[in-house]
Amino acid sequence: MEEVDKILIHALKQIGTDVSEEISSINQFSSELIVKAVVRCIQVINPGLGSPLPSSLPPAMSARFRVGMSLAQACQELGYKGEIGYQTFLYSSELEIRSLLMFLVEKLPRESSEASDQPTGKSVVLQRAIAAAIKAQLSVPWLPMNCRLPLHTETQSAGPLHSFHTLPLSLPYSSTGLGDKYEKEEKEYQRDFLLPVTAQISHQPSMVASILEHHTTVLSAVQQWDNEWNSQGLLSRLTPQEYRARKMARLRKRIKEQLRSNAHPSPEGSFRSSHSSNDLSEVLQMFKSPSSSDHILTKGTHFTHTQKFTFEQEPAAVTSPVPTGRQSDGDVQQRQQAEIESLQQQLQQLCTEIEQLTTDMKHMSVTHTQVLNEIKQKELMNKETEDKIQVKKKTLDFLPDSDNSLQKLQAQVEASAARLVNLASQWEKHRAPLIEEHRRLKEKCSNQELESSRKLSEIKSMQEKIRVATEEARKKEDIHKQLVTQLENLPKDVSRSAYTQRILEIVSNIKKQKEEINKILSDTRELQKEINSLTGKLDRTFAVTDELVFKDAKKDESVRKSYKYLAALHDNCNQLIQTIEETGTILREIRDLEEQIETENSNKTVANLERILEDYKAIRQENSVLAAKIKEG
Amino acid sequence: MELSECVQRGLQALAEPSSVDQSGFQVLVDATFRSLLSAHADSGVLDLPELKQVDQILLKQIHTATTTFILEVVKHNSDKSTISSCLEDLSFSTDRIEIFYTAYQVHVKLRYDQSPFFFSFCSIGRQAPHINDVSWRLEYHMKNAHVNKVNEPCYLISLNTEKEGSSEDVSFTCTVEQLQDLVGKLKDAAKSVERAGQI
């Protein structure tokens, strides 16, 4: 109970109730303190309800009664479900006050739980840092130039003095692992003649700027390559070097085509150059990675938007008054115009001539190809006729010796046919295992493809997991840092660990008690079962013995006596059992009554009754005084 | 704070006792800070007797890596815990971290607290001139040669601005509406800055 009281007193002190230091439990609360505490709570919870309530108990009895009633009503409006009336405040009992105060303290609005649920993303942290820096700068007061301290240099005096200007640096390459890739002369240069980085640029701001820029370029190149490799490179299933080589070849080809198409002189003269630069810039746009950062700076405030709109019209207005032309420049301009026209005419002529020549050239080349084709065809025909002539000549030679040569020819034909059959069978023999090999290798290839695609998906999922895990780890670290700083900022007057320990102790105690109760219940049930079974047995045995003895009792005198003893024994035992049961119930009643006595004792009824009597007498006095006043006036 | 691979390699080489021993480490760190902060480009900054036994190419790589690291630290304005954790990840031993951090404090932090102008070479950026003072004059245009009755007020405003120590006057004239517009825009800007500081 003391912890509850301590928490209540602490909460009341936090909202502004004036509780003195010695009061440490609800028991010691006087009626005034109770009224003050309740009024303050109601004011904090609901200022509208709390404003008409007085903050302390007035001395007059009727006023006190009224205040009590209004407080009770306010508490009921807030939703307190217990019995409440003026008596809770004027003639208080500890339990009622405790429950009422607990209800009110729980209803107090919570302020501190909102600040801890903020997201901890990188951009949020950056924004918070920016906001803090702006706040710090705003808080520095403006001083005239002669009074300025170094504190003001950033925002009020000179400010940055140098513009960001970078120059190329030459850095020594790493020698680990690449070994002999770099020439001996290059290594000698790096060792003996290459200046250290800080000495390569004599203008210090440029040196700083160049070093920072080089570092950032390297970092961003690595990041871009990572992004591209993870998105497109893995899909192409090439090694990194092959992927890079292929990409470079592709880019070179494109640039070559673009330059070639723009290098041809075009008939429209100067207008084409702006066109081609547009195409070139489009081609360069295509080279950019798909996740371009165009949309970072599109969000602007109201201020920047209005600035954009109002200043767009001004340059137009500014440029129009300029070309009014003065008298002395007119001639020069006219002459220049005439020159331009003549030159353009010449250019036009040359262009038309060139066009003609190109069309002639095309014609010629077309006829040239045609003629070549004809020649080829004629040559083919020539060859065919020559072959025919040869065959005819040979047959003519064979004619005189016709029979012999016919036989020879037939024999040759048969021999070549036999050879053909032989070769065909050999080829068949050779073909079969080769086909087998072919099939086997194809299967292996497809299996490998399956394997590689499976491994690819595994790699992807692993990368996802890695990314998710690192993000979570980072998030948890940030949250941890934030919570640690928050923990340090929390007020230290109430020790939470003591409460949590008590709560855990109580929970374990309750668990133990529950177990014990369960045990006792099971014991009781078992006992009850035993009692039931025993009574049953007893009844049965008694009935059996009764019958037996009764049967024999008719004949024998001693058996009759023993029967009477048996009956008496049975009755007496029954009575014993009954008395024991009654004693048990009476003991239980005694315990209940004792508990009731205790609760009644804590109600301080006697003291309250005395106070009520006194108050009643005071009210009667006031009533008579008021009646006398009315009679007089 | 992210570091590129060459910088990481250079710093790891710096941390290894086999490539740079203890006396060489101290001398090298001091020399790096001095080379970064001196106004003249001193090409002999690494010609020190204690560093003769270190391979020259490796020495230059370490020097580049350390200079980049120092500049990144200054750029992010990191505190001791960030620097120590960064160097620990690159396998620096604790006493080497201590030596580095004391050198950083001596050369950079304390000097900055004493006189920020020492680091004017590091202030890179652009800024518009600051407005220090305003003088204004109100004119009333009554007549001119073409129109008999004009009756218009007109402001002549001269802003005393200051840029890099030299002050300059920016003067212009404007009507009442234009001046109201300007004041409205200034108030808008002030509110935007306040709102940005409150997030």
Image (cartoon, coloured by chain):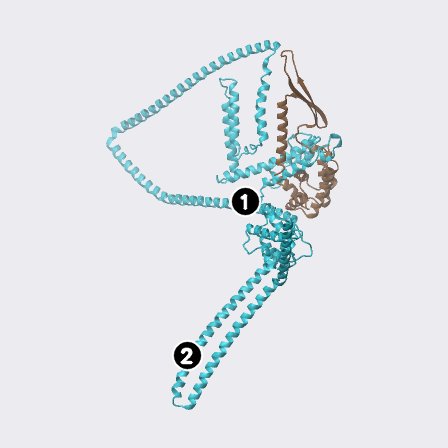
| Quarter of the image that includes the C terminus of chain B | top right
Distance between the alpha carbons at the discs numbered 1 and 2: 80 Å
- Residue A456, image x, y percentages: 48, 44
Chain letter of the residue carrying label 1: A
Which colour is chain A painted? cyan
Q: Residues within 10 Å of mark 2 (few under 14, many from 20)?
A: few
- Kindly identify which residue carries mark 1: A467
| Callout 1 secondary element | helix
User: What count of labels does the image hold?
Assistant: 2
- Residue A76, image x, y percentages: 55, 52
Q: Can residue B52 be seen here?
A: no
Q: Can residue A509 be seen here?
A: yes
Of A463 and A481, the residue lying toward us: A481
| Callout 2 secondary element | helix
- Kindly identify which residue carries mark 2: A540
Callout 2, which amino acid?
Arg
Of B152 and A296, the residue lying toward us: B152
Q: Residues within 10 Å of mark 1 (few under 14, many from 20)?
A: few
Relative to A128, A446 lies left or right: left
